[in-house]
Image (spheres, rainbow, N blue to C red):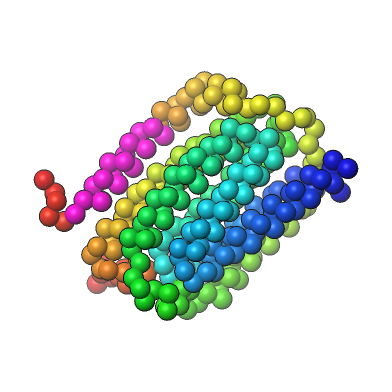
Amino acid sequence: MEQTLSTLIFGVMAALLIGLSVVVVTSKSVFRGAIALTAALGVVAGLFAFLGADFVAAGQLLIYVGGIMIIMLFVIMLSQRPQDHLDRQTNEPWVWGALLALAVAGVLIMQFRAVYRGVFVTAAPMPTTASVGRLLLGDMVIPFEAVSLVLLAALVGAVYFGLEKGDQR
Amino acid sequence: MTLSLHHFLMLSAIIFGIGIYGALTRRNILGILMSIELMFNAANINLVAFNRFLHPSQVWGQGFVIFVMTLAAGEAVVGLSLVLAIYRNIKSVYTEKMNILHG
């Protein structure tokens, strides 16, 4: 019974995620695509929670849905023109793109099916926040510091590129 | 039916394929950025699923997911400010208009 329930929940989340992702890449209005992407990232946070990764699920909501998507919506609203929704949104050789995407996804799916078919969960989910924190400041402390440098560089780069032309004092 | 690891991996492969399609076919550079975010998320689902199913007593996969999220945030911030700078110059967000370097 419990297995059926979790399979049902996974099926609903998978269908939602795939549908929202298709809307992201196909919708004519970029703004609608961004809203769909926000919802899709929320569903991914649900998948993380489903997989027992509570801290990562919360981080997904905070960073992606609350941070990245808000900036993206701002930029979309700042850079659209009224006639944009009349233009076509895909380039000419889109069939080749679709074929390549199908090929990559097909190969990946076949490999995953062949190799990881009967791997099941063995342990009950545990709270992970404390162990993630210990990992980040223990074994992963060097990449942790490196990523803080990268973030500083991104901050400076964003300010630099965001300056107006006559604004460079 | 019991959920197995390959269900999650197949879902992430499908999302990755959709992201590739969007990144290759979108004319709008913001659409391309959003498709790249989709691909990041497919990879993150993979990492968390492998962590949960193969190494349930450790959290290395989740640590990597946090780094991927951080770098995605940095990439989005720099990319979006570049988009705004380009838009101020050529008044367009379509990739085929961004050809002033092609001689």
Is most of the magenta stretch helix, strand or loop?
A: helix
Up-down relation of residue A16 to residue A149 (above or below): below
Give the camera-side residue of B59 and A103.
B59
* Residue drawn at (79%, 41%) of the image: A119
Q: Which quarter of the picture shows residue A24?
A: bottom right
* Residue drawn at (45%, 65%) of the image: A30
Residue B72 at x, y percent in the picture: 46, 45
Residue A100 at x, y percent in the picture: 58, 67
Image label count: 0
Q: Which quarter of the picture shows residue B30?
A: bottom left
Instruction: Say whether residue B13 is visible.
Output: no
* Residue drawn at (45%, 51%) of the image: A69
Q: Is residue A138 left or right of residue A78?
A: right
Image: magenta residue range: A147-164
The answer to whether residue B54 is magenta is no
Up-down relation of residue A129 to residue B39 (above or below): above
* Residue drawn at (53%, 37%) of the image: A59
The quarter of the image holding the N terminus of chain A is: top right
Instruction: Say whether residue A125 is visible.
Output: yes
Up-down relation of residue A162 to residue B90 (above or below): above
Give the camera-side residue of A31 and B71.
A31
Residue A145 at x, y percent in the picture: 41, 28
The answer to whether residue A154 is magenta is yes
